[in-house]
Image (cartoon, rainbow, N blue to C red):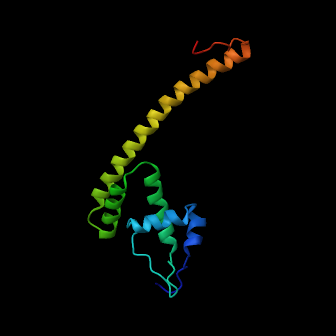
């Protein structure tokens, strides 16, 4: 490890990232960090700030629905260094399109739900809610 680089424990990384220790270990087991996380003399993982930043990106990709296999592929490309930036960009563009489609679907769902909320609010305010979509 480079001298003067802040060394972080897994507990600190958990606090900083908002992820559980279990989740951080999962990311490590899945090979999703850009480097092998070293351990100190006591066998404890030692992270650096850049590891936390990378973890944040990978977690956002995962939370937004990117499959682990694709995240792994992205990690492999970044680890490989320069020369594959267009492939990385394509991977990210595809995921961006998928996320935008999910957002569009959620907006459509929200519009339907909002319409039902407005209908029920009107019926409740007017005292006509009895029997609205009653099963009998």
Q: How many marks?
A: 0
Seen at 43% across and 54% down, the residue is: 62
Seen at 62% across and 14% down, the residue is: 132
The answer to whether residue 81 shows anywhere in this view is no
Image coordinates for residue 119, horizontal then vertical, percent: 62, 18
Vertical arrangement, residue 25 with respect to residue 37, above or below: above
| Residue 105: quadrant of the picture | top left
Quarter the C terminus occupies? top right
Image coordinates for residue 21, horizontal then vertical, percent: 54, 66
The residue nearer to you, when weighing 119 against 94, is: 119
Residue reaching furthest to the front: 136
Vertical arrangement, residue 37 with respect to residue 55, above or below: below
Image coordinates for residue 90, horizontal then vertical, percent: 30, 52
Vertical arrangement, residue 82 with respect to residue 66, above or below: below
Image coordinates for residue 53, horizontal then vertical, percent: 49, 65
The answer to whether residue 131 shows anywhere in this view is yes
On the picture, is 9 further left or further right than 58?
right
């Amino acid at each position: 490890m480079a001298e003067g680089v802040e060394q972080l424990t897994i507990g600190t990384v958990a606090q900083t990232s908002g992820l559980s220790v279990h989740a951080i270990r999962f990311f490590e087991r899945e090979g999703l960090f850009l480097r092998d996380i070293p351990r100190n003399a006591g066998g404890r993982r030692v992270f650096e700030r850049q590891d936390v930043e990378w973890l944040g990106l990978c977690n956002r990709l995962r939370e937004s629905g990117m499959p682990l296999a694709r995240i792994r592929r992205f990690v492999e490309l970044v680890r490989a260094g320069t020369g594959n930036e267009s492939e990385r960009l394509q991977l990210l563009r595809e995921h961006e399109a998928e996320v935008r489609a999910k957002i569009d679907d959620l907006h459509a769902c929200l519009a339907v739900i909002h319409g039902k909320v407005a209908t029920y609010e009107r019926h409740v305010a007017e005292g006509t809610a009895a029997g609205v979509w009653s099963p009998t």
